[in-house]
Image (spheres, grey):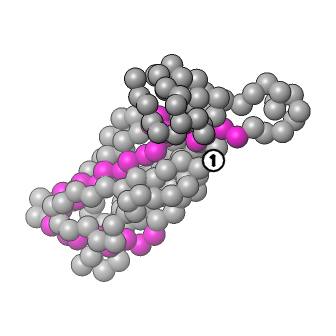
Amino acid sequence: MFRPPYVLGQPTRTVTPLTMITLVLALTVPTASAASRGSAAPVASRTDGALVQGWFHNETTYSLTLKAEHLDFGDTWNPRPPDHIAPRSMVTWISRPGVQGDNGGYVTYTVDRTGGQGYAYMSWYHPYGGSAAHTVRTGGLFTIELRHFGADDTFYFRCQIPTC
């Protein structure tokens, strides 16, 4: 049993797990009366896998510089895609869903020392209750392999020739 000093303005109320579940449901599930009036009842945003975590593995001897990042269907980044990615390193970013629960955006990096020819573009769209969609593109002598599992999108950035 959990006994906080103040719960809902009642200093002596004991909160059991069942009470907490009831309270959470009362705060997050729209009521029938609100739906029948035609007004939208507030619904808490999803947190069960709706955030998307991108993992970027730079398996080359080149560093990358962030060119653009944007959330089309998201609310915030936390953490943001980094400005620079060192050679042979791994970085991560997380995009959080918008009010509707959808999550989508893109990140573009340019590859240093390639005269503007090398780049990596990754986009994702994870709709609320639907199947995820992805697009990956590269320029120059580079490839991206995408592995998607749940809310994790892992990108492996590689060079097509063995010397890089």
Residue 20 visible: no
Residue 140, quarter of picture: bottom left
Name the amino acid type tagged 1. Val
Secondary structure state at the residue bearing disc 1: loop
Q: Position of residue 151 (x, y in %)?
A: 41, 39
Q: Position of residue 23 (x, y in %)?
A: 59, 29
Residue 75 visible: yes
Residue placed at 40% from the left, 23% from the top?
A: 1
* Image position of 72 (left or right of 148): right
Q: Residue furthest front?
A: 12
Residue 45, quarter of picture: top right
Residue that label 1 marks: 99
Residue placed at 89% from the left, 33% from the top?
A: 37
Vertical relation: 117 (above or below) 153 = below
Task: Judge by depth and name the residue closer to the eye, 23 or 86.
Answer: 23
Task: Judge by depth and name the residue closer to the eye, 136 or 40.
Answer: 40
The residue segment tinted magenta is 42-68
